[in-house]
Structures are given as C-alpha cells and as structure tokens.
Image (cartoon, grey):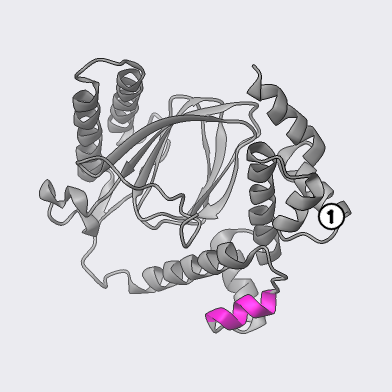
C-alpha cells in the first residue's frame, strides 16, 4: 500500500493513461485519494459515492470523475459491482494541454434537462466504446483505447472543467490538504490503538475543532471513518489470505471480537465467517 490510501495505481501507460476493468462484491472503499484523476464507468449494479461533501448514486451506464487528489469514498449494496476505471496522470498529459493541472474537472450523473446532459451522454457512450475495445484483443486495441480515452478527456476539459489560477482556491485547497493528511495518518496507524486526541494533536487541532472539521468535510464522525478503514482492511485479508478470523481482527486494529463482528456485519451485510466462506466458494466457481 502506498503512503496514503490511494491505491498504488502506477505505472500508467505511455500517455499517462491506465484503463482497467474490475468486478467487486459488496464494495466498500473508505475515503481515500490518489494523484491520478479517476473516471469510473458503472457496467453493472450501483454504488453510493461521497465526494466533496456531495452524496451521489452511480448506476449502470453512468460515469463519475474524481479529480486528482480529490477525497472520495465508494459503497455498494449490490451483489456484484462491475466497472471500467480510467486513471489519468495530468502531468504526463501536459504535452497535449500544458495547463491541464489547473483545470478542476467535475462530472457526475446529470438529469436530462441539464444543459450539459447531451455532452454527459456522449461521454458515457465513449466509455461504453472503451469497454468494448478493452474486451477485444486486436492488434490495434491499445491504440484505439488510448484514442478514446483522450477524446473523453478533451470533452471533460471542454464541458466539465473550471480553470483556476494558482492560489485562487487557497481556502478549499488547505482544507483538502488537511483531509489528505488525516487520511494518510490513519492509513499508516489504523492497526495501532489510535485515539481521536492523538490524530487531532498530529494535525494541530483541538479535539473539539477536529471533530467539527472532520464531520463537516467527510459527512461521518472520525470514529466511524476509522472503523470503516479497519473493516475494509479486514475484508481484504479475509478474501486474500488464509489468516484466521482472530488474526484478521488483530491485524486490522480491533481488540474486541463482539465489536468487530457487529461492525463487519453492519458494513458488509454478513459476518466475517460468512465472508470467508463466500470468498472460498467463489475461488472454485
């Protein structure tokens, strides 16, 4: 895992673009960030997204963009969530658009009466074409994939971006930097006995101000977020290792079996043991 929970996406392709497809069950990805801009196109199921104090639902054949370093979380109650994921390194693509890092891109599902709905629908169609290209295994697939991704990026810059001069959004930028610092610290120390006071001191906030700041910007309490990070880690360990449930609990920062089981079922809709059994069954499907 990288220094903060930002998914270790690199290396990207020659153009600074990485295209992948994935399928997840009972998706639960706590608030995180990454250097690359991320475009998600939903192929099946639906997910609830939290980004920049907004809560949205992403359904089949819809896409959403998380700009570089933008804190976001993803949750799904669907049995299976399939998606196309595009990561874009803005620095690498400056050869096409020198000021690309100064464009803040914001794109999420729009109602049909929105002035930009036509452009949004076209973006979704390009994402659909990109999905089909990635399924094919022709000699020109990589070339066509990069070309389609560049067309999508051009439309995002043209219709869904705001150009901001350096320092123009200093207040917002400072808050986002603080959030990323908190997320980084939690993901480096969540296996330890981590207290709210310790993290507040690390950031330089009082306990009371830290609580208000975190809830205002994240929409949940700090304790809830810490537990989500720990449970998410436990879910990955149950799926990808042969560790016992008690070992998983300990490695994820929990010391109380009852609390661990309750939170796991609350978030994933099943007990840790049921999750382990489901993962084992899927290996042999």
* Residue, far front: 242
Question: Within the image, what quadrant is residue 251 found in?
Answer: bottom right
Q: Which of 176 and 232 is in front in this view?
A: 232
Asked whether, in this view, residue 105 is left or right of residue 285, the answer is left
Count of numbered marks? 1
Q: Is residue 110 visible in the rendered structure shown here?
A: no
Q: Residue at x 39, y 58 (%)?
A: 69
What SS does tag 1 mark?
A: helix
Q: Where is residue 250 in the image (x, y as percent from the top left)?
A: 76, 57
Q: Give the range drawn in magenta.
A: 196-203
Q: Which of 232 and 73 is in front in this view?
A: 232
Q: Which residue is drawn at 83% across and 48% down?
A: 262
6 to 88, vertically: above or below? below
Asked whether, in this view, residue 2 is left or right of residue 96, the answer is right
Question: Within the image, what quadrant is residue 191 found in?
Answer: bottom right
Q: Where is residue 81 in the image (x, y as percent from the top left)?
A: 56, 29
Label 1: which residue? Answer: 259
Task: Kindly report the secondary structure that dominates the magenta region of the rendered protein.
Answer: helix
- Quadrant where the C terminus is found in the figure: top right
Q: Where is residue 147 in the image (x, y as percent from the top left)?
A: 19, 30
Q: Position of residue 14 (x, y in %)?
A: 20, 41
């Amino acid at each position: 895992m990288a220094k903060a929970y930002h998914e270790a996406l690199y290396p990207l392709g020659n153009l600074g673009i990485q295209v992948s497809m994935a399928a997840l069950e009972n998706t639960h990805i706590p608030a995180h960030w990454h250097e690359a801009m991320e475009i998600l196109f939903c192929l099946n199921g639906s997910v609830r997204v939290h980004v920049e104090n907004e809560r949205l639902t992403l359904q089949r054949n819809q896409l959403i963009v998380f700009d570089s370093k933008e804190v976001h979380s993803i949750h799904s109650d669907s049995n299976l969530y399939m998606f196309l994921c595009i990561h874009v390194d803005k620095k690498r693509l400056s050869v096409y658009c020198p000021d690309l890092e100064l464009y803040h891109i914001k794109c999420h599902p729009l109602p049909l009466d929105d002035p930009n709905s036509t452009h949004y629908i076209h973006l979704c169609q390009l994402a659909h074409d990109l999905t089909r290209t990635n399924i094919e295994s022709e000699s020109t697939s990589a070339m066509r994939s990069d070309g389609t991704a560049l067309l999508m990026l051009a439309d995002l810059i043209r219709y869904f971006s705001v150009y901001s001069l350096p320092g123009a959004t200093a207040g917002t930028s400072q808050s986002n930097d603080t959030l990323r610092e908190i997320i980084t610290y939690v993901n480096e120390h969540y296996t330890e006995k981590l207290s709210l006071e310790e993290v507040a001191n690390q950031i330089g906030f009082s306990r009371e101000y830290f609580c208000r700041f975190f809830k205002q910007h994240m929409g949940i309490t700090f304790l809830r977020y810490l537990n989500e990070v720990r449970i998410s880690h436990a879910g990955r360990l149950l799926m990808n290792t042969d560790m016992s449930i008690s070992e998983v609990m300990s490695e994820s920062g929990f010391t109380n079996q009852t609390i661990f089981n309750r939170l796991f079922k609350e978030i994933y809709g099943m007990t840790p043991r049921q999750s382990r059994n489901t993962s084992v069954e899927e290996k042999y499907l």
